[in-house]
Amino acid sequence: MMSVPISWREIPYRYRLIGTKCKKCGKIYYPPRKVCRFCGSKDLEEDKLSERGKVVTFTVVRSPPIGYEKYAPYAVGIIELENGVRVMSQIVDCKLEDIAIGMEVEATFRRVTEDGESGIIAYGIKFRPVIK
Amino acid sequence: MRKVAIIGVGCTKVGEHWGTSLRDLFTEAALAALSDAGIEKVEALYVGNMFSGYVQEQEHLGALLADSIGMPGISAAKIEGACGSGGVAVHAGYLAVASGMFDYVLVGGVEKMTDLSTGHITTALMMAENRDYIGFTGVTFVGLNALIHRLYSKTYGAKPEEIAAIAVNDHNNAVNNPCAQYQYPLKIERVLESPLVADPIRLFECCGIGDGAASLVLCPLEKAKALADRAIEIAASTVATNVLSLNERDDLLVFDATRKAANRAYEIAGVKPDDIDVLEVHDAFTITGVLALEGLGFAKKGEGAKFVSEGNISLGGKIPTNTLGGLKARGHPIGATGVYQVLEVVKQLRGDAGKNQINGAEIGLAHNVGGVDSTSIVHILRRCG
Amino acid sequence: MKPLVDVGVVGYGSYVPMYRIKTSEISRVWGRTEYAPIEEKSLTALDEDTITISCEAAKYALLRAQIDPKDLGAIYVGSESHPYAVKPSGTVVAAAIGAFPFILSADYEFACKAGTEAFQTCIGLVGSKMVEYAMGIGVDTSQGRPQDELEYTVGCGGAAFIFGEKTKDTVAYLEGSLSYVTDTPDFWRRDIQMYPRHGGRFTGEPAYFRMIVSAGTALMKQLGLAPSDFNYVVVHQPNQRFPIEACRQLGFPLEKVKQGLLCPVIGNTYAGSSPMGLAAILDVAKPGERILMVSYGSGAGSDAFSFVVQDAILAKRDLAPKTDVFINRKCYVDYAMYLRQRGEIKV
C-alpha cells in the first residue's frame, strides 16, 4: 500500500538528492531537516548533494519487505558523498559479490517500488559503480 | 521522587500462539503478575507494543487492555518505542509511581507477530526507521544491523565466530527456561552454516518471530517493605535516543543512546559496571549484543566480540548475560521484550531463576533497545534489604 | 521543412542498460538452427524502464548542453513502452532534472519513430521562438513475444537531444527535415495487448524500405544534396541487414553507415534506434561533416533530417560518457534471467 501524497511530496528530494543546509553552521542534512541539531538554527535552505561517493558499508537483502520482492536479492549500502554527507541507498549494476567497502559509485535514476500492477510507480536514486 | 519497587511479575511462554488473541495473551500475563503481587486492582496501566496497528489493525491498546483485564476506567495508554516499547512502558510506569501520582501500576508488553506473514513483519519492523528515506530504499531491519556487522568486522578484525558466540550463549541458557521460545542448545557451526538473511548476517544470528506478553506490578518501595525479598527496587530507569538513521551517525560502531542511558543509570543508582551481577542485553542480532556490551561499559570499544567468545558472559563468567535465553533464545516478541528482560532480572534477584540462578545476585541491569540503538532503555534493579 | 530561425542540437546524451543476452542463448532455448539476425542485444535491469533510461539520457544531454534545466520549454518522450498509458513519461523526466514547472510535456507514440516525431516538434517550438530549448527523447524497453522472430532483436536504450537556436554553442545545426507518413499496418499493438504483432515479410519492401527511401530521397532532393555530400547516414535499425540495404538503396556505401549502426550489439532499440545512432555519430564526427538521419516507425512513416556538425562538438562531446562506453559496459545473462528481468515470468 503506497500513499500517493507521500510519494509525491518527496519527489524533489528523492529524484535529485536534495537535502538541506544550515545557513548558520554549514552542516548538510539528508533527508532534509527544518532544524539543525548542531547549532540549533531553524534557518536551513535546500541544497543539492553531490552525485558521486564511496561505499562505507553494505549488505545484501535476501528477505525483502512488501513491494520489493521482485528485486531481491539486492544490495543496500551507506554511501559517503563527495562533500561528506552520507546517504543510504541500493547499489546496482554490478555483481553482488563485487561490491566492496571503498568502491566508487555514482547516482543513477531507478525504479524503487510500485503499488502493484495498477498503482503508481515510485522512482528514486540508487548508486552504481562509476561509469568512466 | 519516590523509590519504586516491582512486586509482581508474570509472562506467557514466547512462541506461536495461534489460538490466542493479543487481548488474551496480554490478559494472561497481566493476571499472572497481579496474582504474583497479591493485589487485585491497579490505578494505571502502560502497555508496550510496537505494531498492533499494522498487524492486528488494532490501536488504543491502553483502553482496550484495561477493559480486557477487568479494569475499565483506570488511567491507561499504549507506549511505543519500536523494539524498546516494553522498556519505555516500564519507564512510564516507573515515572508514574516515582512522581507520587499513582501507587499501584501495571506495566505490560505484548506483541503478536504470527498474525501476518514474514514479508509483512519485515515491513512492519522497518517502521522503526525513517520510512520515507530509509525504509524506502528496501533495506530491512536485519539489513541495517548487517551494515554495522560488516563494518565492525572490517574495523576491528572480529571473526564471524566471535560475533556469533552470543547466540550460542543464549541458547545454552534457554534450555532451563520453560518460557523460552527455543529451549535447545545451538552449536557455533550451525550458526555459521545457516543461510544468509542480509549479508553478512546469518539466520541463526537473528532472533526469531514469536508471540509473547510479560507484565510487572509496580508500587512505591515504602509500601513494598512487607514483601521483603519479593520486592525488587528499580534503582534507575533511563531512556535516551540517538540520531535515528545510520547514515547520519558520526560513528556507526558506537551505541550512543545505550552509552547515554547507561551512564545516567549508573550515576542515578550509584553503581559501576563492575557492580552488576546479572545482565540482560538487547541482542536482537548477535552484533547488537556485542555493541551493547561495549556501550554499557562491560567491554572496551572494538573488543565486545572477543569478550563474548572468551566466555565472559556465561553463567560462570565475569558478567552472566541473558541468563534465561536473551532475545535469540527466550525470544523477542517486539513490544514485550523490554518487560521480559526486567522480569528475568527480577527472578534472578529474588533467587527464582532455577537451574540458571546466579547465586548472591544483588544488582542487575536490563538493556532494551528500539531500532538500531535509536532508543535505549536501561533499568538497574537492586535487591531490597 | 525549415523553421523560421535556424535550429540545432545544443546537447545530446545516450544510455544503454548494461545487461546483454547472446542470440545464440535464445536459439539454444528454442532449438533454432537458422542464422540469428544479430549477435547480442541489451535488456533492462529489474529496476529500469523507459522513464529511468530517459532520465539518464536527459541528464547526459544537459551535461553537454550546459544549460539551466529551467530554460527547457518542452520535454517529449517518444516510445512504445511508456510505463503509464496515462501520465506522461516526460513529467517524471522533468522532475528528475529540475525542469519544472513552465514546460510542455506529452508522450509521443509512432512506433520506432516516436522519438524523431518529438524532435520535429522540438524544432518547430524552438524555430518559432515559442521556447528557448526543447528536449526530445527516443527510448524504448521494447516487448518481443517469446519464440517470435522479434525476440532475437528487441533491445532497449535511448537518446535525448536538446534543441536550441543555432549559435556557436550548437554541436550540429539542422539544414532541413521532412516527414513521410502513410497508413501502412506492418507492425502494431492493440490496446492492452502485451506483445505487438507484425506482417512478416510485409514489414520490408512496402513498409520499412518504402518509407525510408522515399523520405531520405525527398529530403536530399529538397536540399539539393547527394549522398556524396554526406559523411554519415543513420537509419532505423530493426536488424543488421535492413539498414545496410536501405542505405544502399539511398546511394550510401557501408563506410558511411557503420558508425551509426548499433543494432548488431544492442539490438533494435525501437524509438531509441536512430536517435542512438545519431548520438554515436556525434561522438566522433568532425566539424563541417554532414549527417543524414532517417527514422522509421511502423504504422508507418519516416522522419528525415540533415545535420551539419559545428566546432562546438569538440569541447562538448567529452562532457558526458560516449555511446560506446555504454555499449561496452556489459553483463551477460542466461535466458531464465532474461525472462525474469523482462518481467515475463508471472508470479
Image (tube, grey):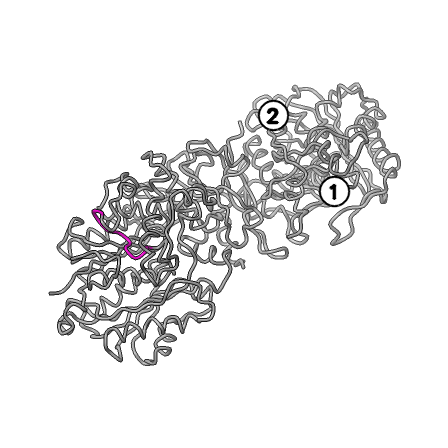
**Foreground disc of the pair 1, 2:** 1
Q: Which part of the image, by quadrant, shows the N terminus of chain C?
A: top right
Q: Position of residue B366 (x, y in %)?
A: 25, 57
Q: Is residue B154 left or right of residue B124?
A: left
Q: Nearer the viewer, residue B383 or B84?
A: B383
Amino acid found under the numbered disc labelled 2? Lys
In-image side of C172 versus A21 (left or right): right
Q: Position of residue A48 (x, y in %)?
A: 44, 41
Q: Secondary structure at mark 2?
A: loop
Q: Quadrant of residue C257?
A: top right
Residue at the image point whose x is 85% and y is 45% from the top: C185
Q: Residue at x 58, y 37 (%)?
A: C56
- Mark 1 burial class by Cα count in 10 Å: few <14, some 14-19, many 20+: some
Label 2 resides on the chain identified as C
Magenta segment range?
B317-326
Using the image, name the chain to which the residue with label 1 belongs: C
Find disc 1 in the rendering and name its residue. Answer: C144
The correct choice, above or below, for B124 with respect to B25 in the image is: above
Q: Nearer the viewer, residue C209 or C103?
A: C209
Residue receiving disc 2: C168
Mark 1 → mark 2, Cα distance in angstroms: 43 Å
Report the amino acid beneath label 1. Answer: Gly
Dominant secondary structure of the residues highlighted in magenta in the image: loop
- Look at the numbered discs 1 and 2 and tell me whether their residues touch, using CB distance below 8 Å: no
